[in-house]
Image (spheres, rainbow, N blue to C red):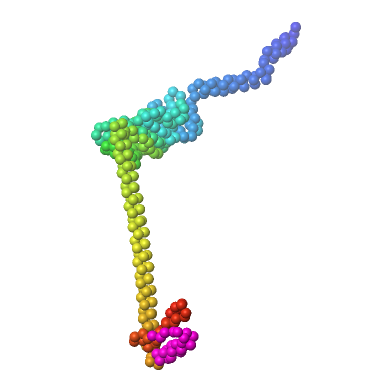
């Protein structure tokens, strides 16, 4: 076989051993895919990121050093093994100091810490327990400094310790029986002193929302004593009310009697004035009448009476005539058969 013929078949065989072009392209894409999958697996295993939710801040720690700038909501990456991100809650949190556990939320009490009532001694050394509710939240702007200084148990060191100290100091100033009476004063004092102490901490680590005094639990003997005093006060108030009511009733009756007496007095005065006015008018009338009587008038009157006398004699023949001593006009007594009639003709 000629030499050029051998070269032809040799080249043909070599060309047939090369992989197709699409296989070369697939191989390259597969390599890239493997790399991507490896990166994804690495991310899943190492998880070099942290997602911060609303109501939280993140604190990046690099080789044990806290970054002073807090991380806001969103996704944040870090270098595994060298860095880490600590998430802390900045929402309002509650500590309930109470004698019984709150079961209103079942077993899920997110952000609510329940602690026993605060046991303290009053001014005489008697035991008293106080129920409080404290609402607060971590200051997000200074969260890195707070966690760096106080650690993740900052609530126990900043809130619980301060609350217990203030409650003991305030309650220790009063006697047990004074506590219920001065409840509002004590509640205000406890909140003011807790707020002052928390705000005095460097970097303002906590924002205090409110402090509510819910219950003052007194010793049984003190409670019985207070109840007796309250019953006595209620009885005294009842007696005072009855006395006041009786006094008011007496004053009312006295006022009515006085009013009636005044009314009678006014009526009597009115009657007296009426009589005086009538008497005065009669006197004036009599005076006028007296002044009006003249001898001529009397003579005329006598003539009129004499005329009536004459008429009487004409009608009654048996009439008897008699004169009244000192009188100017005669009187006539009339007898008619057996019946007697008296007629007096006067002035």
Q: Nearer the viewer, residue 134 or 30?
A: 134
Q: Is residue 158 visible?
A: no
Quadrant position of residue 16: top right
Which range of residues does the magenta coloring cover?
Answer: 298-322
In the displayed structure, does residue 136 sit left or right of residue 220? right
**Magenta segment, principal secondary structure?**
helix
**Residue 300, magenta (yes or no):** yes
Q: Picture coordinates of residue 170 (x, y %)?
A: 29, 37
Vertical comparison of 31 with 285: above or below: above
Q: Quadrant of the N terminus?
A: top right
Q: Picture coordinates of residue 52 (x, y %)?
A: 48, 31
Q: Nearer the viewer, residue 54 or 243?
A: 243
In the displayed structure, does residue 20 sit left or right of residue 60? right
Q: Picture coordinates of residue 258 (x, y %)?
A: 34, 61
Vertical comparison of 330 with 131: above or below: below
Q: Is residue 228 visible?
A: yes
Q: Nearer the viewer, residue 219 or 201?
A: 219
Question: Which residue is at a point 42% across and 82% down the rendered structure image?
Answer: 333
Residue at the bottom extreme, as displayed: 296
């Amino acid at each position: 076989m000629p030499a050029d013929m051998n070269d032809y078949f040799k080249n043909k065989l070599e060309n047939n051993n090369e992989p197709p072009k699409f296989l070369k392209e697939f191989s390259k894409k597969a390599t890239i895919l493997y790399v991507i999958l490896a990166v994804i697996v690495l991310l899943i295993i190492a998880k070099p990121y942290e997602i911060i939710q609303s109501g939280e801040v993140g604190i990046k720690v690099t080789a044990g050093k806290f970054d002073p700038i807090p991380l806001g909501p969103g996704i944040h990456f870090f270098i595994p093994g060298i860095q880490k991100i600590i998430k802390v809650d900045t929402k309002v949190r509650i500590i309930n100091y109470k004698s019984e556990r709150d079961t209103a939320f079942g077993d899920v009490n997110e952000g609510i810490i329940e602690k026993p009532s605060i046991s303290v001694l009053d001014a005489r050394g008697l035991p008293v327990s106080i129920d409080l509710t404290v609402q607060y939240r971590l200051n997000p702007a200074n969260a890195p400094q707070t966690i760096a200084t106080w650690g993740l148990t900052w609530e126990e060191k900043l809130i619980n310790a301060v609350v217990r100290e203030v409650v003991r100091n305030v309650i220790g100033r009063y006697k047990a029986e004074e506590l219920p009476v001065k409840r509002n004063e004590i509640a205000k004092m406890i909140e003011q002193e807790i707020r002052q102490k928390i705000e005095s901490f460097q970097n303002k680590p906590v924002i205090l929302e409110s402090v509510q005094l819910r219950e003052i639990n007194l010793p049984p003997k003190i409670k019985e004593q207070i109840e007796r005093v309250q019953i006595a006060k209620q009885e005294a108030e009842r007696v005072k009310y009855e006395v006041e009511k009786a006094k008011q009733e007496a004053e009312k009756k006295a006022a009515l009697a006085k009013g009636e007496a005044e009314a009678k007095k006014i009526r009597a005065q009115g009657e007296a004035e009426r009589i005086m006015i009538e008497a005065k008018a009669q006197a004036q009338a009599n005076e006028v009448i007296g002044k009006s009587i003249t001898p001529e008038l009397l003579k005329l009157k006598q003539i009129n009476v004499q005329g009536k006398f004459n008429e009487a004699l004409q009608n009654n023949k048996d009439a008897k005539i008699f004169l009244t001593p000192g009188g100017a006009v005669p009187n006539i007594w009339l007898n008619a058969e057996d019946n007697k009639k008296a007629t007096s003709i006067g002035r």
